[in-house]
Image (tube, rainbow, N blue to C red):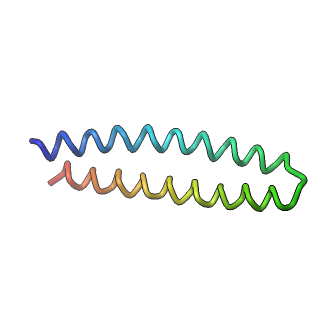
Amino acid sequence: MIASATAEKITTSSRVHIDLVDDFIRLTQDKIDGQRDTFTRESLLDLLATLREERAGYLDLLSSAALSKAA
């Protein structure tokens, strides 16, 4: 029961984090689209890659939590 409750908390938290990271990804993409300075664009593209990696990590947590709840 404790593992199931913990998995549920991880699921809820991960979904909130994914939503927030998605917002940051959209905001960053908008800034990239409006940026003319090459250095700033490259910097924002690096940030975008980092945000996408973060999102993938939260998706991994969701998968792990789902497996834990199923067990």
How far across and how far down the image is residue 62, in percent? 35, 51
Q: Residue at x 18, y 39 (%)?
A: 5
Instruction: Judge whether 5 appears above or below 46 on screen.
Output: above
- 55 left or right of 35? left
Q: Quadrant of the C terminus?
A: bottom left
Quarter of the view holding residue 4:
top left
Q: Residue at x 81, y 49 (%)?
A: 33
Residue in the picture at 39% in, 44% down: 14
Residue projecting furthest to the left: 1
| Residue 68 x, y percent position in the rendering | 20, 53
Q: Tally the marks.
A: 0
Measuring from the top left, give residue 35's x and y in whole percent. Answer: 85, 50
Residue 57 found in image quarter: bottom left
- Say which quadrant the N terminus sits in: top left
> How far across and down, in percent of the image, does residue 3 sit?
15, 47
Tell me if residue 35 comes above or below residue 23 in the rendering: below
Q: Nearer the viewer, residue 37 or 71?
A: 37
* Residue 6 falls in image quadrant: top left
Could you tell whether 30 is left or right of 69 in the image? right
> Is 17 on the left or on the right of 64, as rendered?
right
Q: Please identify the residue farthest to the right as the structure is shown.
A: 36
